[in-house]
Image (tube, rainbow, N blue to C red):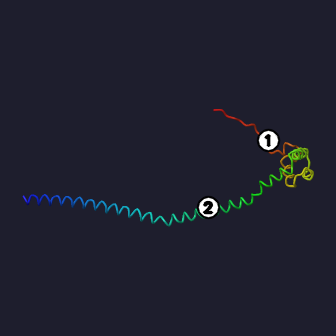
Amino acid sequence: MITLENSTLSLAAAVISLVSLAAVIQLYRAVLHWRERCMGLEARLPELRREIERCASISMRTGRHVKRIESDYSTVAERVDLVEARAPTKDLDEAIRSARSGADTRRLTQFGLSRGEAELVARVHGMGRRGDPEKSAGPPRRPIQIHER
């Protein structure tokens, strides 16, 4: 009976040993897999760092560019308000009518427009080269065609 118990015990110990060995082998394979994965990720780190540095550099340049544009055009709203306050629409309408009838920029400045504004009104609303007011308004407008399906 003792030999039977010893052989059963030996058999159980052998089975436990084999199961433990199989578990250790599986764990070893898992560790190798994760080690390879970590090494691959670590190998990509320098490339990712360079890419982040490039993005940060681009972002900084874009920020500087935006600040420069903001500073360049920060006074535009103030200037528009100033122009609107100093040149009532009645004077502007009269200047446009005068430009359409052929007035030059010197005459248009008498309506309270600056020289640049007078030149703009003359170009947009003034007479064309041949004296045709339609020529100065840009290309002829075509009617909008709507295609139904």
Q: Is residue 122 above or below residue 28?
A: above
Q: Quadrant of the N terminus?
A: bottom left
Callout 1: SS = loop
**37 left or right of 12 in image:** right
Image x and y of residue 74, in percent = 75, 58
Q: Amino acid at mark 1?
A: Pro
Q: Amino acid at mark 2?
A: Ser
Q: Quadrant of the C terminus?
A: top right
Residue under label 2: 59
The answer to which of marks 1 and 2 sits earlier in the sequence is 2
Image x and y of residue 143, in percent = 75, 37
**Which circle, 1 or 2, is nearer the viewer?**
2
Q: Is residue 49 above or below residue 130?
A: below
Tell me whether circle 1 and circle 2 mark residues in contact (CB < 8 Å): no
> Callout 2: 10 Å neighbours few (<14), some, many (20+)?
few
Residue under label 1: 140
The foreground one among 129 and 125 is 125
Q: What distance separates the C-alpha of mark 1 from that of mark 2?
A: 44 Å
Callout 2: SS = helix
Residue at 26% x, 59% y: name it: 22
The foreground one among 60 and 75 is 75
Give residue 41's mark.
Answer: none
Q: Is residue 68 above or below residue 123?
A: below
Residue at 45% x, 66% y: name it: 43
**22 left or right of 85 in image:** left
Image x and y of residue 96, in percent = 87, 45
**36 left or right of 4 in image:** right
Residue most toward the left? 1
**65 left or right of 7 in image:** right
